[in-house]
Amino acid sequence: MSTDNRPLSPHLQVYRLPFTALTSISHRISGVLLSAGSLVLVYWVLAAAAGPDSYQTASAILGSLPVQILLFLWTFVLFYHLCNGIRHLIWDAGHGFELETAERSGQIAIGAAVALTLIAWLIALV
C-alpha cells in the first residue's frame, strides 16, 4: 500500500489542457454566449416595434459604455464561433486532423475573429 498523498488522476489544477481542447471548449461556450446575447437583439427589435419611446430607452441602454463593451465582446464571440465553425466544416471534409495543423487552424480562427471584430466595429463607427 502506497503512502503517497498524490491524487489518483490528474485534475484541472495540475493538468494543462491542450490548445485544441481549449478551442473546442471555447467553441461550445461561445455557442451558449451567442444564445444569451441574442436576447439583447430581441430586446432591441421589440423596443423598435413598441414605438419611439421604447426605442429611445433601448438606445440609451444599449449605447452606454458597459453595454457597448459587452456588445464588442459579443461580436468577438460571434466571429470566433463563425471562424471555428468553418474550421469544423473543414474537419468534416476529412482535412486538418494532424496536431500541428489543428493547432495552427485554431490560431488562425482566433486571429481571424479578432480581425473581423475590429473591422466590423470600425465600419460601424464610421
Image (spheres, rainbow, N blue to C red):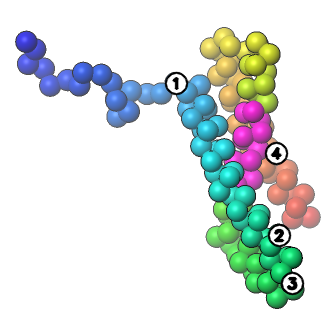
Q: Which of labels 1 and 2 is toward the front?
A: 2
The residue that mark 2 highlights is 45
First of labels 1, 2 by sequence position? 1
The residue that mark 3 highlights is 51
What type is the residue that disc 1 sits on?
A: Pro
Q: Residue at x 85, y 76 (%)?
A: 48
How far apart marks 4 and 3 lie (CA) works out to 33 Å
Q: Residue at x 75, y 53 (%)?
A: 75
CB under 8 Å between callouts 2 and 4?
Answer: no
The residue that mark 4 highlights is 116
Q: Which residues are magenta?
A: 74-85
Q: Is residue 74 left or right of residue 20?
A: right
The residue that mark 1 highlights is 18
Q: Is residue 21 magenta?
A: no
What type is the residue that disc 3 sits on?
A: Gly
Asked which quadrant contains residue 42, the reply is bottom right
First of labels 1, 3 by sequence position? 1
First of labels 2, 4 by sequence position? 2
Q: Secondary structure at mark 2?
A: helix
Asked which quadrant contains residue 25, the reply is top right
At label 3, counting other C-alpha atoms closer than 10 Å, the crowd grade (few under 14, some 14-19, many 20 or more) is few
First of labels 2, 3 by sequence position? 2
At label 2, counting other C-alpha atoms closer than 10 Å, the crowd grade (few under 14, some 14-19, many 20 or more) is few
At label 1, counting other C-alpha atoms closer than 10 Å, the crowd grade (few under 14, some 14-19, many 20 or more) is few
